[in-house]
Amino acid sequence: MTPPASGGERAGGTDEPLLPEFSGGGHGGGGGASVSGAVFNVSTSIVGAGIMSIPAAMRVLGVAPALLLIAAVAVLADASVEFMLRYTGWAGGKRATYAGLMGDAFGRGGAAVLNVFIAFTTTGTLVVYLIIIGDVMSGSVGGGDDHAGVLRELFGARWWTGRQFVLLVTAVFVLLPLVLRRRVDSLRFTSAISILLAVVFMLISLGIAVYALFKGTATMPRMLPDFSRLSSPFELFTAVPVIVVAFTFHFNVHPIRAELRKTSDMKAAVRISLVLCAAIYAAVGFFGFLLFGDATMADVLANFDRSSGAGVPQALNDAARLSYALHLVLVFPLLFFSLRVNVDELLFPGRRPLATDTRRFVSLTAVLMAVLYALAIAIPSIWTLFEYSGSTFAVTISLIFPGAIVLRDVHGIAKRKDKVLAATMIILAVVTSSIAIASNIMSSISDKVRGGHEASR
């Protein structure tokens, strides 16, 4: 049985492809993009979402449970994307977006909720990227950390090495030309470079870890969690949203799929990307935890800044920081694509496709870049917000919504095993996220109480 042709009307613009003039429509053919280009773009979407937190998750869980969790979340991500691709074929070419699937299953309300969730997730992630780029180049603000940044280390504290100016130059002259591109496939070369930089970051981490081992300043990491360092066993669940965030790329599946020569190749591209990225995560997590041990921080770059007392040459630390910052610069445009199209669907429902309206495209791009820049300057650190967003928005986008589409099954194509898997995904997501959120709240309260007691002494 083959999917029926779509004959439905558009609902508030939620079912319009991101780049319809290049997508080719229908089910069988898209643009001229190759599978390798799709692999690079998908891999860039995945790796950019959470590589910085993998070593910290390994510190909480231990090596063995963390590796199992990375593999399990990768398998669930593959299953959820497979659900999305399957229902995309049945929903019809005009609904070949994630929002279109939600609109097909739950109406305009469902599509609007998804757009809001993606907008919050991508905004938070992009602001985090800008903050990290600013930290690497100019130094962190507040928090008491001694972090001068690469430019200030080289040239001292000058107006042009300051955070505001460096981020402004980066946003206008580096990021803006990239985000003004209208085809996702046009970023395949920058995506390939970004993946190469992620591998470079992994190799530098390996080199520093080996150097520290020979110097005798590093020890083999724990294989299992150390419960004596945890406030409660439930703290283990706080690592789950971190790994889920690291595999949240679902909002870029349809734009990348639309530009493939054969849209049926998307499933293979996703699986290759998941294997590649899981291997990178496992390596970066292991080497980072090996080097920094229980001192591993939520932002592993902070450890590289401090050199961890391992006697590692500063040049290696700077190379690690710069390779990671450049990786984030090249990841930025892919996430921005998703942010822009979802905000457009929320603010301008029913309008003609964004890519065909130059004035709206450029204006929305400029406004969003200005907002992201302002937030990155105003907020010194949003790691706590990022952690909570992983327990809510990211988990919902990557597991709950795809599972709900299958359980809704408006086209009657789901098998019993599909519904069992979908229900399992939703239950796991809700339970683990609820425990993680509760543990984070209790940990925050405990820290405040402890701080109050110390201040009163």
Image (cartoon, helix red, strand yellow):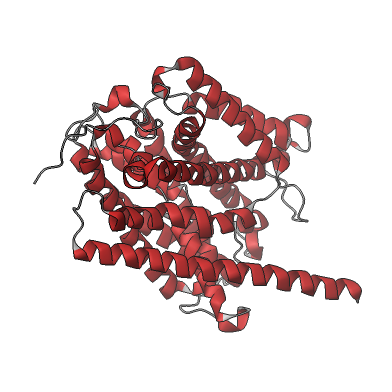
Of all residues, the one furthest to the right in this rendering is 457
Q: Nearer the viewer, residue 287 or 445?
A: 445
Q: Residue at x 56, y 41 (%)?
A: 123
**Residue 398 visible from this viewpoint:** yes
Of all residues, the one furthest to the left in this rendering is 1
Indicate the quadrant containing the C terminus: top left, top right, bottom left or bottom right: bottom right
**Residue 214 visible from this viewpoint:** no
Q: Position of residue 281 (x, y in %)?
A: 42, 58
Could you tell whether 186 is left or right of 82 in the image? right
Q: Position of residue 93 (x, y in %)?
A: 24, 33
Q: Quadrant of residue 275?
A: bottom left
Q: Nearer the viewer, residue 302 or 181?
A: 181
Of all residues, the one furthest to the bottom in this rendering is 228
Q: Residue at x 63, y 27 (%)?
A: 169
Q: Position of residue 256 (x, y in %)?
A: 32, 37
Q: Is residue 385 above or below residue 18?
A: below
Q: Position of residue 298 (x, y in %)?
A: 60, 60
Could you tell whether 417 is left or right of 398 in the image? left
Total marks shown come to 0
Q: Residue at x 39, y 23 (%)?
A: 353
Q: Is residue 93 above or below residue 283?
A: above
Q: Residue at x 70, y 38 (%)?
A: 377
Could you tell whether 18 is left or right of 323 in the image? left
Q: Quadrant of residue 408?
A: bottom left
